[in-house]
Amino acid sequence: VGMNTIRLSSAEYAPPGRDRLLEEWIAQIARGGASPDSPAAARESLAALYHETKGAVYGFALSILKNVHDAEDVLQETYLKVYAGAGEYRSGKPLAWILTIARNLSLMKLREKSRSAQLQDSQWEALEAPQRGSEEDRLVLEAVLSRLPAEESQIVLLHAAAGFKHREIAALLELPIATVLSKYHRALKKLKAQLEVQP
C-alpha cells in the first residue's frame, strides 16, 4: 500500500508494547498472505488487529465522512487493504499506517459521493467508540455533525467518538496542539450556546 503515513508517533497514541503487538499481528498477516500454509494464523491475527484498532479507525473515518454507513464501509475496506498490503508495511508506526489507509479510503469515498449526511438516531447505536456514553454525549455529537465547521467537527469527533487525546489529534491532522485546543474549546462553546437556545 503505497502512501504517505500519518505522522502519529508511538508515544503520542500507544505505548511501545502495544505497537510491538500490532506489528507482530501485521507481520503474521503478511506471512499468511505470502504463504498458503498459514492462512488460519493470518486470519486470527487480522481479527486481533481489528478488535484492537477498530474504534480508532471507525471514529477517524466517521470524523471525515460524517455518515455511519460510509464509515462502516471504510472500516471494512481498511482491513481488507491491511490484509492485502501487510507485506509492504515498513513505517514502524502501525496505527498511523492503518489510519492512513482509512483516511485515503475516506477521502476517496467523499470524492465519489460528494455529499454529507445526517446521522439518524438509530444509527448512533452502531457507533462503537471508547468514550461513547450518555444521551447527552450522543446529542452533542449529533449536533457537531450538522452545526460546526468541518475542522472543528472533526476535532470534536476524534476526541469524543474515537477517544483520541488532543495531542494525538494534533499529530493526526498536522496542526499545532494550541490550534487543536482552541478549535475544540471554541466548538464546545458554540454547541453549548446552540443547545441552550433549543426548546
Image (cartoon, rainbow, N blue to C red):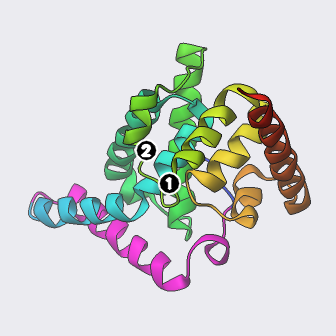
Name the one closer to the observer, 190 or 10: 190
Please give the name of the residue rendered at 53% of the width and 57% of the height, measured from the top-left corner: 97
Q: Are marks 2 and 1 in contact (CB under 8 Å)?
A: yes
Whether 7 is drawn above or below 189: the answer is below
Tell me the residue that label 2 is attached to: 127
Amino acid type assigned to the residue bearing label 1 in the image: Arg
Q: Pick whichever of labels 2 and 1 is earlier in the sequence.
A: 2
Residue range (magenta): 8-36
| Residue 23: x %, y % from top left | 42, 72
Between residues 117 and 30, which one lies in front from this camera angle? 117
Q: Residue at x 66, y 33 (%)?
A: 143
Residue under label 1: 132
Farthest bottom residue in view? 17
> Can I make out residue 146 in this image?
yes
Disc 2 packing (10 Å; few <14; some 14–19; many ≥20): some
In the picture, measured across the screen, residue 105 lies left or right of residue 196, that is: left
Foreground mark, 2 or 1? Answer: 1
Q: Secondary structure at mark 2?
A: loop
Q: Label 1: state its secondary structure.
A: loop
Given residues 127 and 19, the one toward you in this image is 127
- Residue 5 sits in quarter: bottom right
Q: Is residue 21 above or below residue 189?
A: below
Q: Quadrant of the C terminus?
A: top right
Is residue 112 inside the magenta stretch? Answer: no
- Identified by mark 2, the residue type is Leu
Q: Mark 2 to mark 1: distance in Å?
A: 8 Å
Q: Residue at 41% across / 71% down in the picture?
A: 22
Q: Dominant secondary structure of the magenta stretch?
A: helix
